[in-house]
Amino acid sequence: MSIGFESSLPLLMAGVVLLPLLLHLFARSRPPRYQFTAVTLLARLVRESIRARRPRDLLVLALRTLLIAALAALIFQPIIFLDRRLNDATRRNVVVIVDCSASMAYAEGGQTRFSAACADAVDFLGGLKGSDTANVIWLDSNPDAVFPGMGVNYSWLSNELRKGKVTSEGAAIEVAFAMAAAMLEGQEGYREICVVSDFQASVWEFFKPPEFEGINVVLSPVGEGHGANVALGELRCVPAAPLCGEEAEVEVDLHNYSATAVQRLVFVSCGAQRQSRRIALQPWSSALCRVPLSWSTPGLYQVDVEIEEDMFNGDDRGSMALEVRTQQRVALCGKESVSGKIWERLLHALPWIEVQSVTVEEACSGGFDTILAAGWDGAEAALLQERLQRSGALLLAPGSRVTGNALAALTGSDSSSVSGVLQAQTLSGFIGRRLLQDDEPLFAVFQRGTHGDPCAGRVRQTLHIPEALLAGGGVLLRHDNDEPALWRAGGRTQLYLWNIVLDPEFSTVAQYPEFVILSGEILKRCRATDLPEAVEQRASGDLLSWRVPSGISASKVRLLDGAGRELKTMIGGERELTATEAAKPGCYRWVAGEEVLRYSVVPFPAGESDLRQMRPDKLKIEAVTVSGRQARNLREGVSIWPWFIAASALFLLLELLALAPLPLIKKKTGSRNHGG
């Protein structure tokens, strides 16, 4: 703590404080002495009076001295500096990072967090003057600065802060700090980065502060409380590309970011189809809402989902796009094998299947709904694994030469205990299979008894697959010799393992119609979950773009937002159309005339829905945590002259009380009663 003065007179006028002392000493000067007769009584009274007055005179002297000092302070205008870390007499260079990400739109106390942040940032700029420089960086998914470099036009920066708008984007914190550090590099004098943010925990907890040399960091948190919010999460259609007339399910993830149990009404609409569901959510929990939809004609469709609005409504609505097809596209690999020929006949017998015989490499890059690897010998396991990781779907029917390492790569199991080629076991007689899960939806079509037995047909050869390779899923059918016959991967991985030999020499399974029904049910469920080629997903804040295919005039293609408003685009490169403004959450259509050619879906950034805040002192960065007003006071100091007005009045009152006449104390004299 230190004290300064706004006036230049304190050194010249400091003697004013000594005036009461000088007057007191002058009053004590001894007057001339004159001798009178009979002065003994008077001398005794004077001595008693002096003993009584001397302490009071010292008190009056002290009060008068304090009064004069307080009055002089009004002229000197003292300023108190509580913390010198933010006060430097040299040239100041300040970069203010203002968070304008989506979470800043949350309203508290009659204003949004963003409005409070902008007002706070104006205070950070308020104490700059002279040769000081400053700049403002907007923190979103693509941080940008008001000035290209440091500037001195503080009023322009303040006006830009007052006109600022919150976005629907995330926060690229590292990029903003790197920009600020680059602007301050080479600047002479005091250098400072001020960050005004709600310090949203879901974003800032992953921030790794860079190492700054000679740059001070100031953190200014805005917002209070946890910010209760109910948000839409991921939207999915199961299957991702439904067929005409097939009932699909729209899955909606709901999240309750509050300490209170709530209920929300979920509205799902697509064209003339509109449905609603009421979902209950426990505190700090998630729930899954499923709504069935179906389509009678093929094409691209937009599905809109909405929940009841709350104080933070940016994540209360969302959209998705899907493609409805007439046939499921299946890639058949291994057609030349015995089982491959049987699978090919089966696929051609299903009218809703479009089959192509291709290599594994072509299957993984061709955009097929399902890959069927018949008689697989372990080749191209890495390609198949990579396709599965990209939300692909694989029905794997291994042959007798497959290795444990290749199979483990797809099932995600530990192959350390399994090496070499898996052994095929030829039995002395035919054996059957048994169903392990009666309530499995895959076998629901057989439960009515009109479609036979899913275990129809018998085999006398099985491939020995160690249980260690199947730890990441569940066995649905098992041979009578306990070897797995049908296995499905766990989670969202679309992988089925078919270990039922189809070679007529060792099997009668393919002779039964139940084989066609069971295989069809597996293929319906074993479908890729990634987006169709005509649908893309982009991040909020991106510039939407599309390379128009040949045969379509790029000049006739328009980009429409969810409300049907046409967005401006520019043509560049080879038929590349790019929007001129950043995308906000919603569903955008690329159309030619009335035909929708492509959808661009922009979801709300998931990390911005959890409004819980992080304490700035939890960040692993050396910084001062103050508000803009406090930082301005720390820089400029706090004028304390108003306090001296109150002190002057107090000292004057105490002096008047000290000068008041002392009350007389009458001595009681006793009288003797002699009686009479």
Image: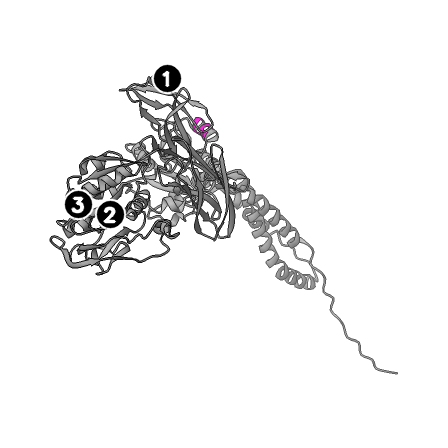
Percent x, y of residue 35: 66, 57
The image's colour scheme reads one colour
Amino acid on which disc 1 is placed: Lys
- Image height check: is 563 above or below 115? above
Disc 2 element: helix
Q: Which span of residues is magenta-colored?
A: 156-160
Q: Nearer the viewer, residue 299 or 256?
A: 299
Disc 3 element: strand
Q: CA distance from mark 3 to mark 2?
A: 22 Å
Q: CA distance from mark 2 to mark 1?
A: 55 Å
Determine if residue 129 is in view: yes
Q: Which residue, given by chain and number where applicable, does mark 2 sit on?
A: 511
Q: Which residue, given by chain and number where applicable, does mark 1 sit on?
A: 556
Residue at the extreme right of the image, as rendered = 676
Amino acid on which disc 2 is placed: Gln
Q: Nearer the viewer, mark 2 or mark 1?
A: 2
Label 2: how many Cα within 10 Å (few below 14, some 14–19, many 20+): few
- Image height check: is 478 above or below 156? below
Callout 2 touching callout 1 (CB < 8 Å): no
Amino acid on which disc 3 is placed: Trp
First along the sequence among labels 3 and 2: 3
Question: In the rendered view, does 471 fall on the left or right side of 538?
Answer: left
Q: Nearer the viewer, residue 77 or 8?
A: 77
Residue at the (14%, 56%) spot, across then down: 426
